[in-house]
C-alpha cells in the first residue's frame, strides 16, 4: 500500500519562503512522476509543479520563477521550494505520486498561509 505524506507547511509573511517535502512509501518501484497541487478555499485544485523520474519539470505560470520542484536523495521524495510568497499562494498543498503498475496516490495536504 503506497502512502504519500507532505510536510513543511505553515504561516509566513508575504515575500517569505517555505520548503514543502513529500515522501511516498510502500512502492517497490520508483515513481513515474510526482507533483504538487494546491486548492484555495472556494477554488478548484490546480497544478503547481511536477517532476518526472528523468528529472524534467513543469510549472504553472503562477509558480514560474518563484517555486522550484526537486527530487530528494531518498527514493520517491520530492521538495517544493517556494520563494517570494504572495497572499494568493495561500492554499492547501497536496502531493501527488504516480507509480508504474500501481497508479496514482495523493497525500492528505499541508496548509500554507501567506499573510500580507
Image: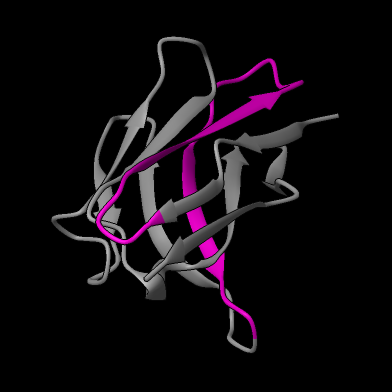
Is 113 magenta? The answer is no
Residue occupying the point 63% across, 81% down: 41
Left or right, 8 with respect to 50, comes to right
Image coordinates for residue 97, horizontal then vertical, percent: 59, 42
Residue occupying the point 45% across, 30% down: 78
Left or right, 91 with respect to 59, comes to right
Image quarter in which the N terminus is found: top right
Image coordinates for residue 114, horizontal then vertical, percent: 44, 62
Relative depth, front residue between 9 and 93: 9
Left or right, 112 with respect to 107, comes to left
Residue occupying the point 76% across, 20% down: 26
Residue occupying the point 57% across, 76% down: 40
- The vertical placement of 81 against 67, above or below, is above
Q: Which residues are magenta?
A: 13-41
Q: How is the image coloured?
A: one colour
Image quarter in which the C terminus is found: bottom left
Which residue lies most toward the left here? Answer: 65
Left or right, 75 with respect to 60, comes to right
Which residue lies most toward the bottom here? Answer: 42
Is 34 magenta? The answer is yes
Which residue lies most toward the top here? Answer: 73
Image coordinates for residue 83, horizontal then vertical, percent: 25, 48
Amino acid at each position: 500500500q503506497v502512502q504519500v505524506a507532505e510536510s513543511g507547511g505553515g504561516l509566513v509573511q508575504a515575500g517569505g519562503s517555505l520548503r514543502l517535502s513529500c515522501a511516498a512509501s510502500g512502492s517497490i518501484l520508483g515513481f513515474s512522476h510526482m507533483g504538487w497541487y494546491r486548492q484555495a478555499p472556494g477554488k478548484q485544485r490546480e497544478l503547481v509543479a511536477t517532476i518526472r523520474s528523468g528529472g524534467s519539470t513543469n510549472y504553472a505560470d503562477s509558480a514560474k520563477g518563484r517555486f522550484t520542484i526537486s527530487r530528494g536523495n531518498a527514493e520517491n521524495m520530492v521538495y517544493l521550494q517556494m520563494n517570494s510568497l504572495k497572499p494568493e499562494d495561500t492554499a492547501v498543498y497536496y502531493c501527488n505520486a504516480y507509480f508504474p503498475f500501481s497508479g496514482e496516490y495523493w497525500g492528505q495536504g499541508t496548509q500554507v498561509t501567506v499573510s500580507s
